[in-house]
Amino acid sequence: MKIQEAIFNVFPFEFHLTWNEGGELIKLQFKFSFDIKPKIKVLSSSIVLDWVKNFYYSLLDYWNFKEDYIKVPHKIWATNFQIKVLKELQSLKIGEILTYKEFSERIGFKKAYRAVGLALSKNPLPLVYPCHRIIGNKGLTGYSQGLLLKQFLIYRELNYKFLTNNVKKMT
């Protein structure tokens, strides 16, 4: 299978994306980037440009709070349990934060919070499956893209939720 890749910046992030030959996203990594000019750094072939555009528009929908997660064609290889965990992540709304224990109870596996944590640690598509919304009983715990990014994403979502709920009440 021939994979395709792209690296591009959209402030405040740099994205590393990998697709299979069918144009399905199979890996997503991102980190903070302070380059304020959007730019494509790497395209493995010209066909990838359309996939990058599709990802970018879906990212904008997520970033502007129109969608709860990035919606792009994708493919994951996972166990049935991992798929159940990842699919349930997509039902979480922006600003809905659960502990591993609450989340495991939600999917019907009361004592499987460690297994949930393991499944989330293997999530190849954060933001498509928004695992940053799951935290430990005592606060933030691991995130494949780093705890600072997890904190940033949660902070952003919680502030949006607070502002939209309170502005509606005031008007």
Image (cartoon, rainbow, N blue to C red):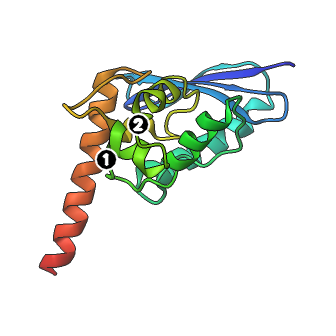
Residue extending farthest to the left is: 170
User: Which residue position is annotated with label 1?
Assistant: 97
* Quadrant into which the N terminus falls: top right
Q: Amino acid at mark 1?
A: Ile
SS under mark 2: loop
Q: In the image, what residue type sits under mark 2?
A: Lys
Compared with residue 168, is residue 32 higher up or lower down, i.e. above or below? Answer: above
Q: Residues within 10 Å of mark 2 (few under 14, many from 20)?
A: few
Q: Earlier in the sequence, mark 1 or mark 2?
A: 1
Residue at figure coordinates x 75%, y 30% from the top left: 48
The residue most toward the right is: 1
**Count of numbered badges drawn on the protein:** 2
- Measured Cα–Cα span from mark 1 to mark 2: 19 Å
Q: Is 27 on the left or on the right of 88, as rendered?
A: right
The quadrant of the image that shows the C terminus is: bottom left
Q: In the image, residue 85 lies at what x, y percent?
A: 54, 40
The residue tagged with tag 1: helix, strand or loop? loop
Give me the residue at 67% from left, 31% from top: 79
- The mark closer to the camera, 1 or 2, is 2
Question: Viewed as shown, does residue 86 lie left or right of 94?
Answer: right
Image point (43%, 51%), residue name? 106
Mark 2 sits on what residue?
A: 111
Residue 92 % position (x, y): 43, 53
